[in-house]
Protein backbone atom coordinates (compact mmCIF):
# COMPACT_ATOMS: atom_id res chain seq x y z
CA UNK A 1 0.00 0.00 0.00
CA UNK A 2 1.40 3.39 -0.98
CA UNK A 3 1.68 6.27 1.43
CA UNK A 4 1.55 9.44 -0.63
CA UNK A 5 0.98 11.89 2.18
CA UNK A 6 3.72 14.28 3.41
CA UNK A 7 5.71 13.29 6.47
CA UNK A 8 5.19 16.78 7.95
CA UNK A 9 1.90 18.50 8.67
CA UNK A 10 1.07 21.43 6.40
CA UNK A 11 0.98 23.70 9.45
CA UNK A 12 4.53 22.59 10.28
CA UNK A 13 5.69 23.34 6.74
CA UNK A 14 4.35 26.89 7.07
CA UNK A 15 6.30 27.23 10.31
CA UNK A 16 9.35 25.79 8.53
CA UNK A 17 9.13 28.47 5.83
CA UNK A 18 8.94 31.18 8.50
CA UNK A 19 11.91 29.60 10.31
CA UNK A 20 14.01 29.74 7.13
CA UNK A 21 12.96 33.35 6.56
CA UNK A 22 14.07 34.20 10.10
CA UNK A 23 17.50 32.67 9.43
CA UNK A 24 17.88 34.76 6.29
CA UNK A 25 16.83 37.90 8.17
CA UNK A 26 19.53 37.20 10.77
CA UNK A 27 22.28 37.13 8.15
CA UNK A 28 20.86 39.94 6.06
CA UNK A 29 21.05 42.21 9.11
CA UNK A 30 24.76 41.35 9.36
CA UNK A 31 25.45 41.87 5.63
CA UNK A 32 26.38 38.20 5.09
CA UNK A 33 25.86 37.13 1.47
CA UNK A 34 23.75 34.03 0.69
CA UNK A 35 25.46 31.76 -1.85
CA UNK A 36 24.59 28.55 -3.69
CA UNK A 37 26.90 25.58 -4.26
CA UNK A 38 26.65 22.52 -6.53
CA UNK A 39 25.10 19.40 -5.03
CA UNK A 40 27.32 17.24 -7.29
CA UNK A 41 31.11 17.11 -7.26
CA UNK A 42 33.91 15.09 -8.86
CA UNK A 43 35.53 14.79 -5.43
CA UNK A 44 34.34 13.95 -1.95
CA UNK A 45 35.83 14.26 1.54
CA UNK A 46 38.35 12.02 3.28
CA UNK A 47 36.64 12.22 6.70
CA UNK A 48 36.73 8.74 8.24
CA UNK A 49 33.28 9.12 9.83
CA UNK A 50 31.30 10.49 6.87
CA UNK A 51 30.33 8.55 3.74
CA UNK A 52 28.87 10.25 0.65
CA UNK A 53 26.08 9.15 -1.64
CA UNK A 54 27.47 8.46 -5.11
CA UNK A 55 26.22 8.47 -8.67
CA UNK A 56 27.77 8.61 -12.13
CA UNK A 57 27.58 10.89 -15.16
CA UNK A 58 27.94 10.08 -18.82
CA UNK A 59 29.89 13.23 -19.60
CA UNK A 60 30.19 12.70 -23.35
CA UNK A 61 28.59 10.51 -26.01
CA UNK A 62 31.10 7.79 -25.18
CA UNK A 63 30.13 5.01 -22.81
CA UNK A 64 32.55 6.25 -20.17
CA UNK A 65 30.85 7.23 -16.93
CA UNK A 66 32.42 9.52 -14.36
CA UNK A 67 31.77 8.97 -10.65
CA UNK A 68 30.14 11.90 -8.89
CA UNK A 69 29.44 12.57 -5.22
CA UNK A 70 26.49 14.38 -3.66
CA UNK A 71 27.83 17.04 -1.34
CA UNK A 72 28.04 16.09 2.34
CA UNK A 73 28.64 19.78 3.08
CA UNK A 74 29.10 22.93 0.97
CA UNK A 75 32.37 23.61 2.81
CA UNK A 76 34.95 23.12 0.06
CA UNK A 77 32.98 25.12 -2.51
CA UNK A 78 32.37 27.90 0.00
CA UNK A 79 36.06 28.14 0.84
CA UNK A 80 36.83 28.40 -2.87
CA UNK A 81 34.42 31.36 -2.96
CA UNK A 82 36.19 32.89 0.04
CA UNK A 83 39.57 32.47 -1.64
CA UNK A 84 38.10 34.23 -4.70
CA UNK A 85 37.16 37.26 -2.58
CA UNK A 86 33.50 36.69 -1.65
CA UNK A 87 33.98 37.86 1.96
CA UNK A 88 31.30 36.82 4.52
CA UNK A 89 28.92 34.18 3.12
CA UNK A 90 26.23 31.69 4.18
CA UNK A 91 24.52 28.69 2.58
CA UNK A 92 21.06 27.33 3.37
CA UNK A 93 20.28 24.24 1.32
CA UNK A 94 20.49 20.51 0.74
CA UNK A 95 23.26 18.11 1.73
CA UNK A 96 23.44 14.32 1.59
CA UNK A 97 25.11 11.59 3.65
CA UNK A 98 25.02 7.83 3.28
CA UNK A 99 23.87 6.85 6.75
CA UNK A 100 20.78 5.10 8.14
CA UNK A 101 17.61 7.07 8.73
CA UNK A 102 16.75 7.57 12.40
CA UNK A 103 15.11 10.06 14.74
CA UNK A 104 18.00 12.47 14.15
CA UNK A 105 19.30 11.39 10.72
CA UNK A 106 18.07 11.54 7.13
CA UNK A 107 20.14 10.86 3.99
CA UNK A 108 18.92 14.19 2.55
CA UNK A 109 18.82 17.13 4.92
CA UNK A 110 19.13 20.92 5.11
CA UNK A 111 22.39 22.53 6.17
CA UNK A 112 23.07 26.07 7.31
CA UNK A 113 26.75 26.89 6.93
CA UNK A 114 28.45 30.26 7.19
CA UNK A 115 31.92 31.83 7.21
CA UNK A 116 33.02 35.08 8.80
CA UNK A 117 36.29 36.72 7.75
CA UNK A 118 38.57 37.92 10.56
CA UNK A 119 36.50 36.05 13.17
CA UNK A 120 38.33 33.80 15.62
CA UNK A 121 36.60 30.82 17.24
CA UNK A 122 35.16 32.80 20.15
CA UNK A 123 33.78 35.48 17.81
CA UNK A 124 31.88 32.77 15.95
CA UNK A 125 30.79 31.03 19.15
CA UNK A 126 29.25 34.34 20.24
CA UNK A 127 27.41 34.68 16.92
CA UNK A 128 26.07 31.11 17.19
CA UNK A 129 24.75 32.03 20.63
CA UNK A 130 23.02 35.05 19.10
CA UNK A 131 21.43 32.90 16.40
CA UNK A 132 20.09 30.38 18.94
CA UNK A 133 18.68 33.23 21.01
CA UNK A 134 17.10 34.62 17.81
CA UNK A 135 15.55 31.30 16.72
CA UNK A 136 14.83 29.45 19.97
CA UNK A 137 14.93 32.18 22.65
CA UNK A 138 17.49 30.07 24.55
CA UNK A 139 20.68 31.17 26.25
CA UNK A 140 23.73 29.02 25.53
CA UNK A 141 26.26 27.83 28.10
CA UNK A 142 29.93 27.22 27.23
CA UNK A 143 32.44 24.63 28.48
CA UNK A 144 35.69 23.14 27.17
CA UNK A 145 35.98 19.49 26.10
CA UNK A 146 38.56 18.96 28.85
CA UNK A 147 36.34 20.51 31.53
CA UNK A 148 33.39 18.32 30.48
CA UNK A 149 35.36 15.08 30.88
CA UNK A 150 36.82 16.14 34.21
CA UNK A 151 33.36 17.16 35.48
CA UNK A 152 31.48 14.01 34.44
CA UNK A 153 34.13 11.24 34.24
CA UNK A 154 36.93 12.59 36.45
CA UNK A 155 39.81 12.22 33.98
CA UNK A 156 41.69 14.50 31.59
CA UNK A 157 41.05 13.49 27.94
CA UNK A 158 44.10 15.44 26.75
CA UNK A 159 46.65 13.36 28.64
CA UNK A 160 45.58 9.76 27.96
CA UNK A 161 48.32 7.17 27.51
CA UNK A 162 47.88 3.88 25.66
CA UNK A 163 47.69 2.17 29.06
CA UNK A 164 44.93 4.58 30.12
CA UNK A 165 42.98 3.74 26.96
CA UNK A 166 43.12 0.02 27.73
CA UNK A 167 42.16 0.59 31.37
CA UNK A 168 39.17 2.76 30.44
CA UNK A 169 38.12 0.30 27.72
CA UNK A 170 37.99 -2.49 30.29
CA UNK A 171 36.31 -0.33 32.92
CA UNK A 172 33.47 0.74 30.63
CA UNK A 173 33.37 -2.52 28.60
CA UNK A 174 34.16 -0.73 25.34
CA UNK A 175 36.71 -3.11 23.79
CA UNK A 176 34.23 -4.11 21.08
CA UNK A 177 34.24 -0.50 19.81
CA UNK A 178 38.02 -0.51 19.52
CA UNK A 179 38.54 -4.02 18.12
CA UNK A 180 39.03 -2.88 14.51
CA UNK A 181 41.60 -0.32 15.61
CA UNK A 182 43.54 -2.54 18.03
CA UNK A 183 45.11 -4.59 15.23
CA UNK A 184 47.12 -1.57 14.11
CA UNK A 185 47.55 0.06 17.53
CA UNK A 186 51.33 0.23 17.18
CA UNK A 187 51.00 2.91 14.50
CA UNK A 188 50.94 6.49 15.86
CA UNK A 189 47.91 7.39 13.75
CA UNK A 190 45.98 4.43 15.11
CA UNK A 191 46.87 5.29 18.70
CA UNK A 192 45.09 8.60 18.14
CA UNK A 193 42.24 6.84 16.34
CA UNK A 194 41.77 4.42 19.28
CA UNK A 195 41.85 7.30 21.75
CA UNK A 196 39.36 9.34 19.74
CA UNK A 197 37.04 6.35 19.28
CA UNK A 198 37.09 5.73 23.03
CA UNK A 199 36.45 9.39 23.86
CA UNK A 200 33.60 9.58 21.33
CA UNK A 201 31.80 6.63 22.92
CA UNK A 202 32.36 7.90 26.45
CA UNK A 203 31.16 11.37 25.48
CA UNK A 204 27.98 10.08 23.83
CA UNK A 205 27.20 7.65 26.67
CA UNK A 206 28.04 9.62 29.78
CA UNK A 207 28.49 13.32 28.97
CA UNK A 208 26.27 14.40 26.08
CA UNK A 209 23.01 13.68 27.94
CA UNK A 210 23.58 15.35 31.33
CA UNK A 211 25.61 18.14 29.73
CA UNK A 212 22.83 19.38 27.42
CA UNK A 213 19.60 18.06 28.91
CA UNK A 214 16.93 20.76 28.65
CA UNK A 215 19.49 23.38 27.69
CA UNK A 216 21.95 24.52 25.01
CA UNK A 217 25.69 24.04 25.49
CA UNK A 218 28.73 24.80 23.31
CA UNK A 219 31.78 22.59 23.87
CA UNK A 220 35.08 24.15 22.75
CA UNK A 221 38.73 23.10 22.29
CA UNK A 222 38.48 19.51 21.12
CA UNK A 223 41.70 17.41 21.13
CA UNK A 224 44.20 18.25 18.38
CA UNK A 225 43.70 14.75 16.91
CA UNK A 226 40.06 15.74 16.25
CA UNK A 227 40.94 19.01 14.53
CA UNK A 228 39.36 18.09 11.18
CA UNK A 229 39.78 21.31 9.16
CA UNK A 230 40.48 23.53 12.17
CA UNK A 231 43.56 25.40 13.29
CA UNK A 232 45.34 24.14 16.38
CA UNK A 233 45.42 26.22 19.55
CA UNK A 234 48.66 27.76 20.79
CA UNK A 235 49.29 24.82 23.13
CA UNK A 236 49.07 22.41 20.14
CA UNK A 237 47.06 20.03 22.35
CA UNK A 238 43.66 21.30 21.33
CA UNK A 239 41.95 22.57 18.20
CA UNK A 240 40.07 25.84 17.73
CA UNK A 241 36.92 23.78 17.21
CA UNK A 242 33.51 23.76 18.91
CA UNK A 243 30.20 21.89 18.83
CA UNK A 244 26.70 22.89 19.90
CA UNK A 245 24.33 20.50 21.68
CA UNK A 246 20.72 21.23 22.58
CA UNK A 247 18.55 18.79 24.55
CA UNK A 248 20.99 15.92 23.88
CA UNK A 249 21.01 16.60 20.13
CA UNK A 250 24.18 17.58 18.26
CA UNK A 251 23.35 20.71 16.27
CA UNK A 252 26.54 22.43 15.05
CA UNK A 253 30.24 21.94 14.36
CA UNK A 254 32.49 24.94 13.81
CA UNK A 255 36.09 26.12 13.96
CA UNK A 256 38.74 28.64 13.14
CA UNK A 257 39.62 27.51 9.64
CA UNK A 258 42.93 25.94 8.74
CA UNK A 259 44.50 27.98 5.92
CA UNK A 260 47.80 26.09 5.43
CA UNK A 261 47.53 23.89 2.30
CA UNK A 262 50.48 21.66 3.23
CA UNK A 263 49.06 20.86 6.67
CA UNK A 264 45.62 20.28 5.16
CA UNK A 265 47.02 17.85 2.58
CA UNK A 266 48.85 15.96 5.34
CA UNK A 267 45.58 15.59 7.26
CA UNK A 268 43.79 14.29 4.17
CA UNK A 269 46.56 11.72 3.58
CA UNK A 270 46.32 10.67 7.23
CA UNK A 271 42.54 10.27 6.90
CA UNK A 272 43.01 7.95 3.94
CA UNK A 273 45.54 5.83 5.84
CA UNK A 274 43.01 5.28 8.61
CA UNK A 275 40.23 4.63 6.08
CA UNK A 276 42.38 1.96 4.46
CA UNK A 277 43.17 0.28 7.79
CA UNK A 278 39.45 0.23 8.61
CA UNK A 279 38.59 -1.32 5.24
CA UNK A 280 36.94 1.84 3.91
CA UNK A 281 37.52 3.08 0.35
CA UNK A 282 40.18 5.71 -0.20
CA UNK A 283 38.88 9.15 -1.21
CA UNK A 284 40.77 11.24 -3.74
CA UNK A 285 41.96 14.57 -2.39
CA UNK A 286 40.02 17.55 -3.77
CA UNK A 287 42.85 19.32 -5.61
CA UNK A 288 40.66 22.32 -6.45
CA UNK A 289 40.19 22.88 -2.73
CA UNK A 290 43.93 22.58 -2.08
CA UNK A 291 44.59 25.03 -4.92
CA UNK A 292 42.18 27.50 -3.33
CA UNK A 293 44.13 27.25 -0.06
CA UNK A 294 47.36 27.81 -1.98
CA UNK A 295 45.84 30.89 -3.63
CA UNK A 296 45.04 32.21 -0.17
CA UNK A 297 42.09 31.51 2.10
CA UNK A 298 41.47 34.61 4.22
CA UNK A 299 41.61 34.28 7.99
CA UNK A 300 38.11 33.16 8.93
CA UNK A 301 35.93 30.93 11.06
CA UNK A 302 33.02 28.80 9.88
CA UNK A 303 30.24 26.65 11.29
CA UNK A 304 27.68 24.15 9.97
CA UNK A 305 24.26 23.64 11.58
CA UNK A 306 21.73 20.90 10.93
CA UNK A 307 18.67 23.05 10.30
CA UNK A 308 16.12 20.21 10.36
CA UNK A 309 17.34 19.20 13.83
CA UNK A 310 17.21 22.80 15.00
CA UNK A 311 13.68 23.19 13.64
CA UNK A 312 12.69 19.88 15.26
CA UNK A 313 13.67 21.36 18.62
CA UNK A 314 11.94 24.64 17.79
CA UNK A 315 8.68 22.79 17.15
CA UNK A 316 9.00 20.22 19.95
CA UNK A 317 8.85 17.33 17.47
CA UNK A 318 10.15 13.85 18.21
CA UNK A 319 11.64 13.00 14.80
CA UNK A 320 13.53 14.89 12.11
CA UNK A 321 11.23 13.27 9.52
CA UNK A 322 8.34 15.33 10.93
CA UNK A 323 10.14 18.53 9.90
CA UNK A 324 10.37 17.62 6.18
CA UNK A 325 7.78 17.55 3.41
CA UNK A 326 8.76 14.00 2.45
CA UNK A 327 11.26 12.29 4.74
CA UNK A 328 12.72 8.84 4.19
Image (cartoon, rainbow, N blue to C red):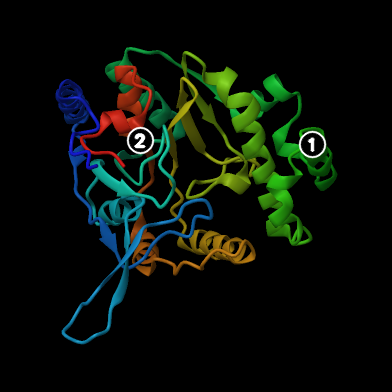
Q: Which residue is under mark 1? A: 168
Pointer 2: what residue?
306
Q: Secondary structure at mark 1?
A: helix
Please tell me the numbered disc located at residue 145.
none
Report the residue at 38% width, 36% height from top: 119
Q: Is residue 183 left or right of residue 133?
A: right
Please rate how many residues cluster around mark 2, counting C-alpha atoms within 10 Å: few if below 14, some from 14 to 19, many from 20: many
Identify which residue is drawn at 25% across, 55% down.
39
Q: Are marks 2 and 1 in contact (CB under 8 Å)?
A: no
In the displayed structure image, the side of residue 164 where residue 102 appears, left or right: left
Within-10-Å neighbours for mark 1: few <14, some 14–19, many 20+: some
The alpha-carbon separation of the residues under discs 2 and 1 comes to 32 Å
Rendered location of residue 166, percent (x, y): 82, 43
Dividing the image into 4 quarters, which one contains the N terminus? top left
Mark 2 or mark 1: which comes first in sequence?
1
Q: Residue at x 57, y 26 (%)?
A: 208
Query: Horizontal placement of 318 versus 162: left or right?
Result: left
In the image, 135: left or right of 253?
Answer: left
In the image, 68 versus 304, the foreground residue is: 68
Amino acid sequence: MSNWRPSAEIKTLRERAAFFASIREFFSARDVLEVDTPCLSYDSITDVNIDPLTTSWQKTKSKNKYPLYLQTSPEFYMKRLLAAGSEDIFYLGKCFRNEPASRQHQPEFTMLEWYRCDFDMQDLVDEVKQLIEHLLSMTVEQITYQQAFIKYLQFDPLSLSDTDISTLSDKYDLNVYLSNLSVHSSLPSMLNARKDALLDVLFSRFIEGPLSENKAVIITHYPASQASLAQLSEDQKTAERFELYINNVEIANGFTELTDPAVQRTRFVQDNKIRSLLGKPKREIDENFISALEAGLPACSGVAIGVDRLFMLNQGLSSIRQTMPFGF
